[in-house]
Amino acid sequence: MDKNTQAINYMKENKFEEAAGIFTEIIEENPEDPVGYVNFGNLLLHINDLTRAQRFFEKAIELDEHVATAYYGLGNLYFEQSLYPKAQENFQKAIDLGLLESDVYYLLGMTFQHQEHFKLALPYLLRATELDPDDEEALFQYGLSLAQSDHITDAKPVFESVLKMNADHSDAHYNLGVISLFNEQLSIALDHFDEALRIQPDHFLAANGKKNVEEAMSENDK
């Protein structure tokens, strides 16, 4: 087992001091290799030492401006601080340099989501779901971006697919309730709001949706 693998295994076991010791050795032995700095940056990011993490990612880029994983690390760092335009820039750079994994597309999509650029989020979240079809959260966020972009008809089967993966996804039920309410399917909407509240009793939006449906039904009965 090489040192990088050993250090990463320590990180997975939450043995951060041991991992840091090995990453330090790797950097001392290969001070011109950016990979050691990226890995140490990832460790620092994991323990929320953002200032030092940034220095390590930037050092990796200084050594080799084509290291995609260093830009991905910076993207994560800025994302954690809600600096979404900076995160967006770095995730895009990572993709441009060939990092074509589900996570980077998902997080790039989420930078647009958080800036309420819902239509711009769509292609990246869709790509994330294509690269990792089992990623429940990416699929849900793709459905949410569709709904927020007024593609209600397209959003419905996406939320239904989320429920096939996780029948207890309260937010998927809530959004299906909203879509059903939009389509004037009051009883179906009520069922989804009830399910959302069964799963998450403090789901304020579902409670409000249920109240609106019950009021509409009461009006219809008059």
Image: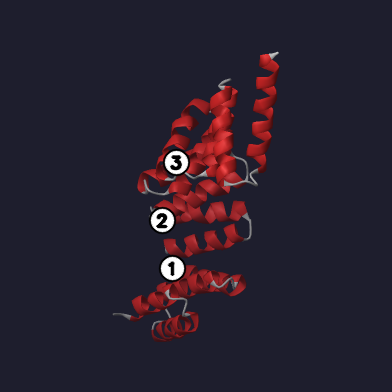
**Residue located beneath label 2 in the image:** 97
Q: Is residue 56 above or below residue 80?
A: below
Provide residue 114's location: percent of width, then percent of height.
61, 47
Disc 3 to disc 2, how far (Cα)?
31 Å
Q: Which mark is residue 162?
A: 3
The image quadrant of residue 164 is top left
Amino acid at pointer 1: Asp
- Disc on the earlier residue, 1 or 3: 1
The image quadrant of residue 36 is bottom left
Q: Is residue 107 above or below residue 206?
A: below
Amino acid at pointer 2: Leu
Amino acid at pointer 3: Val
Provide residue 212's location: percent of width, then percent of height.
68, 28
Disc 1 to disc 3, how far (Cα)?
40 Å
Q: Residue at x 36, y 77 (%)?
A: 4
- Disc on the earlier residue, 3 or 2: 2
